[in-house]
Image: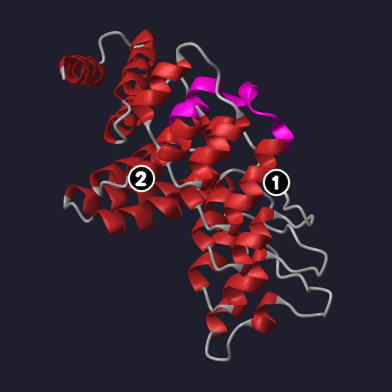
């Protein structure tokens, strides 16, 4: 099974999983080898209980050091590795990702509940690194998740670390973020803007707008669903899947979450997993037109594959 995982042979894995169970070694072989679909297959087959928590956390830390954002999100969302995981040296993965300049992964960690003010032994936070890099957008995002302009062990604040021509960072990092109903209203406005550009197939713009909506209301499952649809339409099934899984986790009774997730699995050439997901959704709403149509189509696809 480990060999099939390292090769990304999902057909072989499907056969082996009928009589065997996935192991952390297999999952590691898939994810560290960049075989995302095989990793998804193993993670879904095993669930959190199949993989030792400590080993899965160590894998996450290594993947952070590889800038493997999609693989990290898979571990967070399907395997259940805590976003507060630390590297072997005891450093928060959020800070590690920030120093590496992987602010996309930092955002994903914040969306999954990590403390925006986590610091390493030097008092460095993700915002310190973002400010030093002149990344205004991430500073704004982190503030929405509660980041404060605290000093590191050298007495440096994010504002003081920002490039001289980036005075906006100093303003943003001290800005009080909206909260409660006000944040929900702002999030809704960004969602509506996203819907408009999505209708025009401007998916990159829509992703940015939905991401801002998520930053204001990270528990709103609809925003993840909409962003998943954007990634899906770009053919970025890995990223689309992680948003769909997040959506389903936030609202497991919403049929569309399973439609989104199933479509992503089908895009990753995992038809059996897609079928199972559609059927999970149909248990909630047996007459859902999208799920019924998707299930019918995936059954046809599976039949064609079996006839080859």
**Is residue 219 at all visible to an observer of this figure?**
no
Identify the residue at horizontal 73%, vertical 57% (top origin).
118
Residue range corresponding to the magenta coloring: 39-54
- The x and y percentages for residue 81 are 64, 37
Residue 217, percent from left and from top: 51, 45
| Number of marks drawn | 2
Does the magenta stretch mainly form a helix, a strand or a loop? helix
* Residue at horizontal 76 percent and vertical 70 percent from the top: 150
Left or right of 39, for residue 300: left
Q: Earlier in the sequence, mark 2 or mark 1?
A: 1
Estimate the spatial distance between the alpha carbons at disc 2 and disc 1, rounded to whole Å.
24 Å
Query: Which label sits in the foreground, 2 or 1?
Result: 1
Residue 227, label in figure: 2
Residue designated by label 1: 84
Question: Looking at the image, which is closer to me, 126 or 96?
Answer: 96
Residue at 53 percent across and 65 percent down: it is 138
Reply yes or no: does residue 44 show up in magenta. Answer: yes
For disc 2, the neighbor class at 10 Å (few under 14, some 14 to 19, many from 20) is many
Front residue of this view, candidates 306 and 134: 306
């Amino acid at each position: 099974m480990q060999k099939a995982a390292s090769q990304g042979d999902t057909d072989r894995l499907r056969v082996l999983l009928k009589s065997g169970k996935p192991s952390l070694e297999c999952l590691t072989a898939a994810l560290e080898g960049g075989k995302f679909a095989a990793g998804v297959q193993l993670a879904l087959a095993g669930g959190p209980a199949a993989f030792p928590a400590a080993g899965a956390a160590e894998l996450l830390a290594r993947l952070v050091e590889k800038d493997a954002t999609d693989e990290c999100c898979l571990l967070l969302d399907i395997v259940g590795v805590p976003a507060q995981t630390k590297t072997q040296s005891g450093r928060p993965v959020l800070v590690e990702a920030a120093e590496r300049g992987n602010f996309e992964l930092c955002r994903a960690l914040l969306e999954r509940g990590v403390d925006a003010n986590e610091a390493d032994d030097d008092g460095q936070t993700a915002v310190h690194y973002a400010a030093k890099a002149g990344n205004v957008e991430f500073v704004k995002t982190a503030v929405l998740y509660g980041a404060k302009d605290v000093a590191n062990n050298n007495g440096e604040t994010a504002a003081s670390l920002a490039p001289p021509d980036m005075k906006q960072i100093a303003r943003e990092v001290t800005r009080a973020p909206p909260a409660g109903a006000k944040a929900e209203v702002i999030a809704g406005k960004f969602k509506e803007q996203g819907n408009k550009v999505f209708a025009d197939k401007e998916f990159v713009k829509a992703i940015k707008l939905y991401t801002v909506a998520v930053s204001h209301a990270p528990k709103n499952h609809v925003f993840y669903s909409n962003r998943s649809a954007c990634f899906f339409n770009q053919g970025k099934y890995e990223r689309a899947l992680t948003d769909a899984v997040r959506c389903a986790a936030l609202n497991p009774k919403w049929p569309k979450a399973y439609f989104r997730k199933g479509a992503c699995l089908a895009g990753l050439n995992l038809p059996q997993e897609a079928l199972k997901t559609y059927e999970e959704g149909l248990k909630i709403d047996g007459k859902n037109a999208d799920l019924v149509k998707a299930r019918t189509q995936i059954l046809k696809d599976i039949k064609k594959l079996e006839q080859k």
